[in-house]
Image: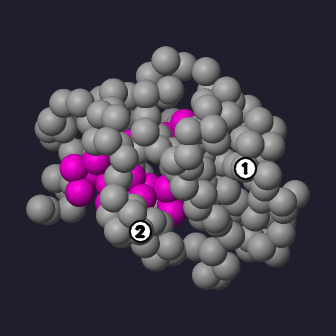
Amino acid sequence: MEFIDLIKLRKSIRLFQKTKIDHKLMLEILEAGRLAPSACNYQPWKFVVVNEPLVLRQIRESYPRDWFAGAPQVIVICGDYSESWKRPFDGKDHCDIDVSIATDHITLMAASKGLGTCWVCNFNPEKVSEALQLPANLVPIVLIPIGYPTETIKPEDKKRKPIDEVVFYNGYSIND
């Protein structure tokens, strides 16, 4: 599959079969996240796979939506701000950027394997930290419900701004 076709194939999935993902396949997907680039190669992330019913129930309380409760597994992607690179000029912390790149790698790998995912950022991080008994240095940043979709995923056109609204060469002027 061409990479652009994979990008077009990946979309947010909110209806999952109850079947859990095989451990070996899950490791392949997580390996894609592990291999993601990060600022200065600091890799300030941890991936927590949640598939035990009691812990899943607790994670679902952090984002109480019916569709989310239907996911058979959730990957909680955490960032460690004590390990992330900070730009020396202004102190800009790149943890969220690094975690986002790893998350994107995970979702694209899942799509390439016929699995569905959805980025969830609108959740209560305290509930997630408590459910997973995370150490203070780890912050849950993204929840990725993952599973086999109930329908076949097909590439589709995405609603995006036209390229001439987002690409500029050698500067940007709002007067042009």
Q: Residues within 10 Å of mark 1 (few under 14, many from 20)?
A: some
Q: Does the image show residue 29?
A: no
Residue 55 vs residue 94, the one in the foreground: 55
Q: Is residue 75 above or below residue 174?
A: below
Tell me, yes or no, whether the highlighted magenta stretch contains residue 118.
yes
Q: Residue furthest right?
A: 136
Q: Is residue 110 magenta?
A: yes
Please, what is the three-letter code of the amino acid marked with disc 2? Answer: Leu
Name the foreground residue: 89 vs 154: 154
Compared with 12, 22 (above or below) is below
Say if 130 sits above or below 159 in the image: below
Residue at 32% across / 42% down in the picture?
19
Residue found farthest to the top: 66
Q: Which amino acid type corresponds to the residue marked 1 in the rendered image?
A: Leu
Give coordinates of residue 108: x percent, y percent: 33, 56
Task: Please identify the quadrant where the N terminus is shown.
Answer: bottom left
CA gap between label 2 and label 1 equals 19 Å
Sequence-first disc among 2 and 1: 2
Assign the C terminus to one quadrant of the image.
Answer: top left
Q: Which mark is residue 105?
A: none
Percent across and percent down for residue 78 are 67, 56
User: What segment carries the magenta color?
Assistant: 101-122
Q: Are marks 2 and 1 in contact (CB under 8 Å)?
A: no
The residue identified by callout 2 is 27
> Can residue 129 be seen by looking at this rendering?
yes
Identify the residue at image location x=34%, y=35%.
18
Q: Dot 2: within a 10 Å radius of its alpha carbon, few (fewer than 14), some, or many (20 or more) residues?
A: some
Rendering coords of residue 143 (x, y %): 57, 43
Image check: 62 left or right of 150? right
**Mark 1 element type:** helix
Residue under label 1, please give it: 132
At x 66% / y 48%, what residue is drawn?
A: 141
